[in-house]
Amino acid sequence: MKLFNTLTKKVEEFVPNVEGKVNMYTCGPTVYHFAHIGNLRSYIMEDVLEKVLRYAGYDVKRVMNITDVGHLSSDADTGEDKMLKGAKRENKTVMDIAKFYTDAFFADCAKLNIKTPDVVEPATNCIDAFIEMIEVLLQKGYAYRAGENIYFDTSRLDTYYVFGNQSEEELMVGVREDVTEDENKKNKNDFVLWFTKSKFEDQALKWDSPWGVGYPGWHIECSCISMKHLGEYMDIHCGGIDNMFPHHTNEIAQSEAYLGHKWCNYWFHVHHLNDQSGKMSKSKGEFLTVSLLEQKGYDPLAYRLFCLQSHYRKPLVFSYEALDQAAGTYKKLKKRIQDLERSGAADETAVAQYKEKFVEIVGNDVNTSMGITLLYDVLKADLSGVTKRAIVASYDEVLGLELLKEAVAEAGDVDAELEAYVLGKIEERKVAKKEKNFALADAIRDELLENGIAIKDTREGVVWERI
Ligand SMILES: [Zn+2]
C-alpha cells in the first residue's frame, strides 16, 4: 500500500506501527444540520481507504467522533455555536438536534454504502477525558488561563504549522474574515481548550470543571477520543482538506504536547467538492443533500461512482450534467454485469490474480478511477462470465457500488426497456440504410416517432430523445 501523506507531501509506502494492524481515525460530522454531498465526498473516499486496507489483508480499527458540542461557526473559535444555532433554527433542544442529525448522517452514509466505523463516540460522552488532558497541558506549561478560559499556547511549540506554508496562507484568509478577535489570546494561533466565560450566555450544555462551569473547545475532542480507543500511536488520521487548518494542526499541537512524542504517522486529506460557483457550503447556493438527489431521481450510488471516478486529491466539480453522466455509466455497467453468463465454475487462479492487481492499483494512493478502469478491463477480458462475476463481487467489497445486486422492478426499469427497444430500432434502421432500403429506414423512424421518440443523425452517430 502507498499513501500520500500531507505531513511530508509525498506518496509513501504505508508502514503501520504494528505489523498487519491499522489504527485509523476520522473526524466526524458536527451534527447541527444535514451533511451536504461535499462533506460526504470525504466520507466516501475515507470508506474506500478503510475497505482497501481490509482488502489488502490489514486488520483495521477505525474510530470516529460526533461533534455535538464546542464547534463554533468559525473553525478558529469565533462566531456562533453551531449546535446552538441549529437548536434555535428549529426550536428544539441541542440534544434533540444532535440526535436527529446524527441519525440523518448515518442514514445518508447507509445509502452511499459507507461502512459505520468500529467506534463512534459523541464528544459529550468524554468530557472527563477532555478535562484530564487539559489539566496535563496546564501542568506541562502548554496551556494558560485568560479571561476565565483555558487556551493552548502555540508559542511553546518548535513547529506549529506542521502541514507547511499552505496552512499559513489559509490562516491569513481566516484572520481577515475574523471579525471578533479574542483579546485573551497571547498569540494569534492560540486556541480555546475550555470555555468558562464565553459570549454565549445561553450555552445549553455546561459541565463542572476545575476552572468553573463551562464547555470544551472543538479540537480537544479528536485528540481525546482517538487516544481513548486507539492509544498513543496512530497510523492514519483522515478528514476533509478544510480540516487541515486549524483543526488538524491544533489536534497535533495538543496531542504531541500532551504525549511528548509523535502521535500520528499518516495524514489523509480529501479535497473539496465544488459547485460551479466555488466551494460548496450549507449557506450558499442550492443545499445539496443525498435526499435532494433522491428526490430528483438519482440513485445515491451513482453519486458514489461519480466520486470514485476522480482522485481524492483533486478538487471535483459537481454539476447535474456530470452526475447524469455518472448515473448513465452506472446503469450501463450494472446491466453489463447482470448479463454475464452465470453457469459453470469460476477460474479461481484468475480471480486471485485480478485481486492482486486491484490491490496494486487501488492500493496506490487510493486510485479509485484506475480501479474502475480495471473493472472494465475485467469485463473485456477473455474470461468466463462466472469468473468475471466473481472478480466483480470481490472488487465491489471496496468499491461499494452493489454491482451484482439485481435491479428490482421499478420506474427505472421501464427506462432500461425503452432504451433497449430504441437502440434495437436504431440498429435495424442502420442495417436498412446500409442495404439502401430507405423506405424501411423511414418507416422505422416514423414508428419511433409514433412512440414518442425522435432520432437525429449526427457525426457521432444516431442520438435519440423522448418528445
Ligand atoms: Zn477532528
Image (cartoon, rainbow, N blue to C red):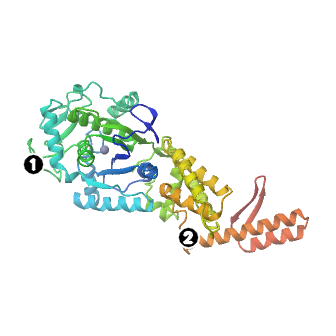
Question: Picture coordinates of residue 411 (x, y %)?
Answer: 57, 73
Q: Residue at x 65, y 62 (%)?
A: 384
Circle 1 — which element?
Answer: loop
- Horizontal side of 448 relative to 335 (left or right) equals right
Residue drawn at x 53%, y 48% is 368
Q: Nearer the viewer, residue 101 or 342?
A: 342
Which residue is nearer to you in this view: 7 or 248? Answer: 7
Residue 280's spot in the image, x, y percent? 44, 47
Q: Nearer the viewer, residue 291 or 421?
A: 421
* Relative to 10, residue 360 above or below: below
Q: What residue sits right under mark 1 in the picture? A: 208
Side of 277 where 420 appears, left or right: right
Q: Which residue is mark 2?
A: 407
Say whether residue 106 is visible: yes
Secondary structure under tag 2 reads loop
The answer to whether residue 271 is left or right of residue 354 is left
The amino acid pointed to by label 2 is Ala
Name the quadrant containing residue 325.
bottom right
